Image: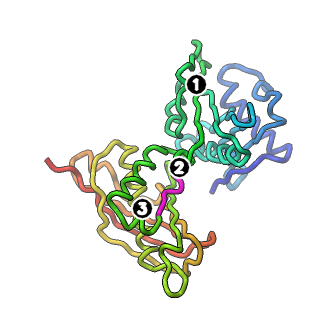
Amino acid sequence: MSQIITPETPEQFADYFHLRWRVLREPFQRPLGSEQDEYDQLSHHRMLVDDDGKVLAVGRLHFNSPEEAQIRYMAVDPDERGQGHGVAIIFALETAARQEGAQQIVINSRKETLGFYEKCGYQLNDDSAAVGGPQAEYQLRKTFSEVNRIIYRPEWCAELQNEWQQKIPISDAMAIKIHQYTGRVFETRAQLSRNINVHNTMFAGSIYSQATLTCWGLLHLQLQERGLPGSIVLADGQIKYRKPVTEDPRALAKLADIQGDFSDLEQGQNAHLLIRAEVLSEERPVAEFTGRFVVLAPRD
């Protein structure tokens, strides 16, 4: 289990700066110390650590002006790449920027990481000109909006929300909204007031519907990630209700919990997938849903 922390002790900062140097400076034969600058004393620092305290990823945020923040020194341990750690750091730094009133945020990126930042909702500046060489940089910018508070694939999530409203009217009636997507975790939220029963708690059917839609949404986005066509249908669903829902509920589905193989679709066959979602109220687990879904391959 990993968590985002703010380095505070000398030992934590030593580990934080060492990963910066190892990833961003050592490959270019830069000396220790070159990974630090005069803005470090005035910046927000975040790092992702595992249960043993090993640093998996780091990043820094500072302000260029009251309205504009900048992310720098993004680094992920090379042995830990592809696990969503970079997205976690971006999310933590953007949250800090929004809380301090930033209206936009900029990032300088090398060519090989441009695609990652674009998936996180950043746009390449039209006048961004990179000089030649292995450390050439391009500048990307994100102007904060309600849509791009979703950290990963915000445009896709906006399209999905609109599709729900148009094709699944119950989602709008229940006020189910996409709250966050990180590429590995998909979260929805709903309004208790739209789903309340005579006991002033959430209808069991509403809990079931939100959990089902959360799983469906994650599968939909994963099909897009893989460039695969298909229609998603629920074949069977089981839910365990543990406690009443007394506050606006959250439902989360995780990529790591999907069982099955998407590759059947590449062969023109239906894909059978098992996925679970957890529903929380007041940060307590209140229900667990397990759904068996079929992705129907297109037919000629």
Q: Residue at x 39, y 59 (%)?
A: 259
The answer to if 289 sits in the magenta stretch is no
The residue lying at 38 percent from left, 58 percent from top is: 165
Element at label 3: helix
* Extreme residue in the left direction: 300
Task: Specify whether 102 is left or right of 210.
Answer: right
Q: Which is more N-terminal, label 2 or label 1?
A: 1
Identify residue for label 1: 110
* Residue, disc 3: 215
Which of the marked residues, 1 or 3, is nearer the chain's N terminus? 1
- From this viewpoint, which residue is outermost toward the bottom? 198
> Where's residue 155, x and y in %?
45, 43
Q: Nearer the viewer, residue 297 or 69?
A: 69
Query: Which residue type does callout 1 highlight?
Result: Arg
Nearer to us in this view, 7 or 99: 99
User: In the shown orientation, is residue 246 left or right of residue 223?
Assistant: right
Region in magenta: 176-181
Dot 2 crowding, Cα within 10 Å, few <14, some 14–19, many 20+ = many
Relative vertical location of residue 172 with respect to residue 56 in this rendering, above or below: below
Where's the N terminus, which quadrant? Answer: bottom right
Residue 41 location, x and y as percent? 84, 36
Q: Determine which residue is flagged by label 2.
A: 182
Category of crowding for the residue at label 1, using alpha-carbon neighbours closer than 10 angstroms: few (below 14), some (14–19), many (at least 20): some
Q: State the residue in front, 283 or 121.
A: 121
Q: Secondary structure at mark 1?
A: loop
